[in-house]
Amino acid sequence: MSATSYKELGLSNTKEMFARAMAGKYAVPAYNFNNLEQLQAVLMGCAESKSPVILQVSSGARKYANQTMMRFMAMGGIQMLKDMGSEIPVALHLDHGDSFELAKSCIDSGFSSVMIDKSDLPFNDNAAVCKQVVEYAHERGVTVEGELGVLAGIEDEVSHETSTYTRPEEVEEFVEKTGVDSLAISIGTSHGAFKFQVKPGEELPPLRFDILEEVEKRIPGFPIVLHGASSVVPSLVDKINEFGGKLKDTAGIPEDQLRRAATSSVCKINIDTDGRLAVTAAVREVMATKPEVFDPRKYLGPAREALKALIIHKNETVIGSAGKA
Ligand code: G3H
Ligand code: 13P
Ligand code: ZN
């Protein structure tokens, strides 16, 4: 397929979004999607709460839904918003891109923002790939997110057993060498539904705000990204378990800590797992309580509603992006 610019698709890059978020002391939510119902829920939830939004596509999502389909779904989403009279800024972002070729392919197919995640490589190798992506992206007005430090956790194609906190003394050189527009850091969040294995009543280790503050001192005003920011919402976990699921003794990042992060130089907060939990809880409930149902709309519809409600809640009370579009 011929190359398309994100501008033709009505998308925004993240530059202006982050500048406004930094000044306004809130973050922009980045929600992952893999299918129609997730995309609709994210866009409708953000339109209703008047929030800017970053639609995230992982390489696993591209494989699942087909890369061409993904691009046209995003285009369809933008048109749906226009038809609804909504003008919220929307970025289409590659989540955890692992190669220059993948980032290039996304940019050529209309993504407005890409992440290049080579954080498990030595500093210079990570920086070299980031710089290569930045050169290609910036010529086309596309923004680039890099990462320093490694998050633990498992989500399909993104997986590390242990975490390594970001070393603040490295961030200045990394940003200068690569030209990235934002930087993901590791301060104690992790990917997936099993961030902390805890028994009820056990204390969670707090996020390392001291590392974040050190980073802010070294690159003041530079947009920081927090991955692995799902709260593993307890009411959703309980509902999943009530209707036959098995998610035991797990916890995520408490909302008050995310709220605090959103008022700092953290400009982008990534949430995927909580959306998955909302969808699964709703589908399980229908399956368990209405065994006569066989029309997918009868369980995917409630799942879409549950996800939309979750998104509005996050934007309004956790991320602070509601009303900022
Ligand atoms: O951080 C990873 C994202 O949540 C994407 O997960 O690779 O399972 O699509 P995935
Ligand atoms: P969660 O697994 O905490 O939702 O994190 C998602 C993420 O970081 C996507 O890049
Ligand atoms: Zn992530």
Image (spheres, grey):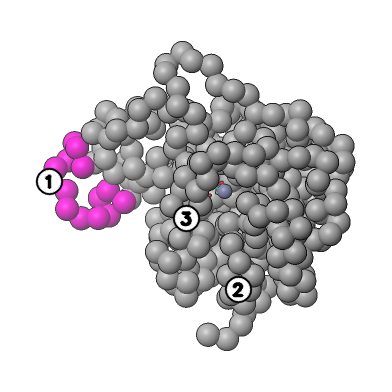
Name the secondary structure under disc 1: loop
Examine the image and state in which quarter residue 190 appears. Answer: top right
Location of residue 246 in the rendering, given as x and y in whole percent from the top left corner = 29, 33
For the point 46% across and 13% down, which residue is it? 201
**Percent of width and height locating residue 132:** 74, 70
Q: Position of residue 209 (x, y in %)?
A: 72, 29
**Numbered disc 2: secondary structure:** helix
> What amino acid is found at the position of numbered circle 3 in the picture?
Glu
Whether the residue carrying mark 3 lies under 8 Å from ligand 1 is answered with yes
Q: Nearer the viewer, mark 1 or mark 2?
A: 2
Quote the CA–CA distance across marks 2 and 3. 17 Å
**Residue 178 picture quarter:** bottom right
At a point 52% along the width and 66% down the height, the residue shown is 74
Mark 2 Cα within 10 Å, few/some/many (few <14, many 20+)?
A: few
Q: Which mark is residue 216?
A: none
Q: Tell me which label, 2 or 3, sits earlier in the chain.
A: 2
Q: Is residue 115 above or below residue 7?
A: above
- Name which residue type carries label 2: Glu
**Residue 292: mark:** 1
Say whether residue 191 is visible: no
> At numbered mark 3, what does the secondary structure look like: helix, strand or loop?
loop
**N-terminal-most mark, 3 or 1:** 3
The answer to which of 127 and 256 lies nearer the viewer is 127
- Quickly name the residue at label 2: 101
Q: Residue at x 76, y 40 (%)?
A: 167
Highlighted magenta segment, given as a residue range: 287-300
| Magenta-span inclusion, residue 311 | no
